[in-house]
């Protein structure tokens, strides 16, 4: 029913008309995984999909072009969220270290945020 | 644990599992209409408790482990089986909710399928419940860099003293304009993809962005900037489609952006909620 050329701003493909990469992306890489008796295990399948990606697509072209916004978006990526949390922890630890060392510097020139000790 | 010394007939010993439905689901149309991964064998169900696996009996010769490793590398074979796996699930989806299984989930006999259904029941039932009345839709957005740059350059050029400038000054102004256009193009890609995703996610029960892997497929001249999957209520599919049409009108006026909608799919993207990526 549907040929693969995209004309106009939106093309809709319904059941069966999907292109092979769309099918493979789902069938090979998604779907629930249970322990089967015959396990062509994920490693094999993943190697396979890597091959397919190379075959079918210009694999990481998008990343080269800087289209990787989903990776750094805390809303979209769990690993990004973890990074964000780690960063925050680091920042807090640093502030704590600074706060601990501050009393020793009493009387020194005020730091660049204007001096928090209230002397005027 | 495949230690059964069951009847060693070549056929009918292995079961390819497409997915799982409720045992009460109507699967008569499924058995009648589907080809499956083995056209000679047809599609049937194996039930246990409240669940039923949708299966095809396949031959050890074609689907045994060793053979499979080799044939998986055979692209025409793979395409045929991958499409068959998806089509059986698509047909089942017309009549009922289902949990799609990953390609190449194969069991050694009915009893092992039943054992799996018992063992995985909580997880499968939970997934079935979550997916009931919902389907997966896929949306991709492609950008033509040439057309986008042309659009943005027109915009930059209009306001400028560039037209009257000559020589070295003209060169510098052009260079500055090109840099501004390149920045604007990057910004556009990001904001178009984000905006599209967030509007569509607002209409979906769940949403997911996949890396744009198949960049060059639909059109060699275009880059894939959004590869999204959306779990949408069956009764909200029309709303979703018309919202996407509106987005396509908005972004795609001069053909710089094209959108593609696929589905309804079995909810492949929404069955493993503990996935890291």
Image: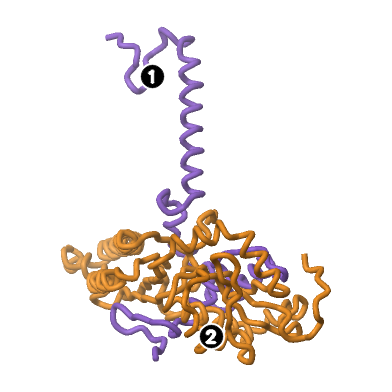
Q: Position of residue B162 (x, y in %)?
A: 20, 65
Q: CA distance from mark 1 to mark 2?
A: 77 Å
* Circles 1 and 2 in contact, beta carbons < 8 Å: no
Q: Position of residue B42 (x, y in %)?
A: 59, 87
Numbered label tally: 2
Pointer 1 and pointer 2 on the same chain: no
Task: Work out whether B79 lies above or below B224.
Answer: below
Q: Position of residue B167 (x, y in %)?
A: 26, 67
Furthest-right residue in this view: B5
Tell me which residue sits at (27%, 9%) in the image: A120
Check disc 2: other Cα within 10 Å, few if <14, some if 14-19, many if 20+. Answer: some
Q: Colour of chain B?
A: orange
Q: Position of residue A59 (x, y in %)?
A: 54, 70
Q: Quadrant of residue B248?
A: bottom left
Check disc 1: other Cα within 10 Å, few if <14, some if 14-19, many if 20+. Answer: few
Mark 2 falls on what kind of element? helix
Mark 1 falls on what kind of element? loop
Chain in purple (letter)? A
Tell me which residue sits at (25%, 65%) in the image: B170
* Front position in the image: A53 or B16: B16
Task: Point out which mark residue A111 bears.
Answer: 1
Task: Work out whether B21 lies above or below B43.
Answer: above
Chain identity of mark 1: A
Chain identity of mark 2: B
Question: Looking at the image, can residue A61 be seen?
Answer: no
Question: Looking at the image, can residue B112 be seen?
Answer: yes
- Which residue bears the numbered disc 2? B31
Tell me which residue sits at (56%, 88%) in the image: B35
Image quadrant for the N terminus of chain B?
bottom right
* Front position in the image: B29 or B237: B29
Q: Quadrant of residue B176?
A: bottom left
Residue B40 is left or right of residue B130, and the answer is: right
């Amino acid at each position: 029913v549907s040929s693969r050329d995209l004309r106009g701003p939106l093309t809709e493909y319904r059941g069966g008309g999907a292109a092979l990469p769309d099918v493979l992306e789902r069938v090979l890489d998604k779907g629930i995984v249970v322990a089967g008796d015959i396990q062509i295990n994920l490693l094999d399948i993943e190697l396979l999909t890597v091959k397919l990606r190379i075959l079918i697509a210009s694999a990481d072209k998008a990343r080269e072009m800087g289209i990787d916004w989903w990776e750094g978006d805390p809303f979209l990526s769990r690993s990004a969220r973890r990074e964000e949390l780690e960063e925050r922890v680091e920042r807090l630890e640093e502030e704590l270290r600074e706060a601990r060392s501050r009393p020793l510097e009493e009387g020194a020139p005020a730091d660049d945020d204007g001096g928090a000790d209230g002397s005027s | 644990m495949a230690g059964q010394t069951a009847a060693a007939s070549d056929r009918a010993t292995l079961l390819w599992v497409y997915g799982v439905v409720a045992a009460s689901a109507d699967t008569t149309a499924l058995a009648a209409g589907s080809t499956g991964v083995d056209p000679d064998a047809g599609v049937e169900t194996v039930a246990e408790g409240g669940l039923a696996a949708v299966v095809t009996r396949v031959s050890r010769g074609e689907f045994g482990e060793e053979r499979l490793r080799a044939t998986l590398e055979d692209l025409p074979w793979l395409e045929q089986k991958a499409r068959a796996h998806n089509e059986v699930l698509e047909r089942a989806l017309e009549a009922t909710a289902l949990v799609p299984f990953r390609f190449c989930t194969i069991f050694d006999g009915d009893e092992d399928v039943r054992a799996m259904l018992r063992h995985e029941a909580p997880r499968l039932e939970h997934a079935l419940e979550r997916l009931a009345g919902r389907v997966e839709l896929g949306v991709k957005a492609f950008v033509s860099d040439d057309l986008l740059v042309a659009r943005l350059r027109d915009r930059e050029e209009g306001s400028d003293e560039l037209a009257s400038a000559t020589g070295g000054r003209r060169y510098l102004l052009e260079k500055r304009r090109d840099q501004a256009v390149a920045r604007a193009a990057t910004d556009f890609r990001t904001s178009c993809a984000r905006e599209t995703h967030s509007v569509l996610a607002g209409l979906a029960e769940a949403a997911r962005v996949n890396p744009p892997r198949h960049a060059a497929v639909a059109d060699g001249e275009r880059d894939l900037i959004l590869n999204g999957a959306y779990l949408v209520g069956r009764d909200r599919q029309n709303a979703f489609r018309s919202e996407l049409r509106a987005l396509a009108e908005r972004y795609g006026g001069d053909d710089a952006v094209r959108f593609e909608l696929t589905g309804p799919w079995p909810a492949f993207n929404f069955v493993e909620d503990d996935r890291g990526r």
